[in-house]
């Protein structure tokens, strides 16, 4: 049962990553000047990165290169998961749901 639970968690995670990539690509194709991004999460990630760098440098160390190079976040935001949960039970078309996601990202 534990192995099945782990498998389903991994499956749900991978499917949500694929859906996020698909929604980002669709939004970029529709309006290349306004890509779909969760700017609030990006700002928080940058802030944490600066704080970590400051702590390491204050101790006389150097931030490892893998931590210093900006990488794509492997963790999706709570906003995306809430939107996904709502969209799974909603019968609205894909374009309408993408519009709602864009509005959600632009609000915060």
Image (cartoon, rainbow, N blue to C red):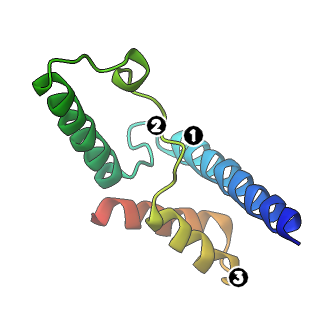
As helix, strand or loop, the secondary structure at mark 3 comes to loop
Q: Secondary structure at mark 1?
A: helix
Foreground tag (3 vs 2) = 3
Which quadrant is the C terminus positioned in? bottom left
Q: SS at mark 2?
A: loop
* Most foreground residue, 1 or 106: 1
Q: Which residue is mark 2?
A: 32
At horizontal 15% and vertical 22% (from top left) the residue drawn is 57
Mark closer to the chain start, 3 or 2: 2
Residue located 29% across and 54% down the image? 40
Q: Find disc 3 in the rendering and name its residue.
A: 91
Residue topped by disc 1: 29
Residue 75, position as x, y percentages in the image: 52, 50
Image side of residue 36 versus residue 98, left or right = left
**Dividing the image into 4 quarters, which one contains the N terminus?**
bottom right
Looking at the image, is mark 1 or mark 3 nearer the viewer?
3
Q: Position of residue 31 (x, y in %)?
A: 47, 43
Q: CA distance from mark 1 to mark 3?
A: 23 Å
Residue contact at pointers 2 and 1, CB within 8 angstroms:
yes
- Distance from the alpha carbon under mark 3 to that under mark 2: 27 Å
Q: Is 62 situated above or below 10?
A: above
Name the quadrant containing residue 45: top left
């Amino acid at each position: 049962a534990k192995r099945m639970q782990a498998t389903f968690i991994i499956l749900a995670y991978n499917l949500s990553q694929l859906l996020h990539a698909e929604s980002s690509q669709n939004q970029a194709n529709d309006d290349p000047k306004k890509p779909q991004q969760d700017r609030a999460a990006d700002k928080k990630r940058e802030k944490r990165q600066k704080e970590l760098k400051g702590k390491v440098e204050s101790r006389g160390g150097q931030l490892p290169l893998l931590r210093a190079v900006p990488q794509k976040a492997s963790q999706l935001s709570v906003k995306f998961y809430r939107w996904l949960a709502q969209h799974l039970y909603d019968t609205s078309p894909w374009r309408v749901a993408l519009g709602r996601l864009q509005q959600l990202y632009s609000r915060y």
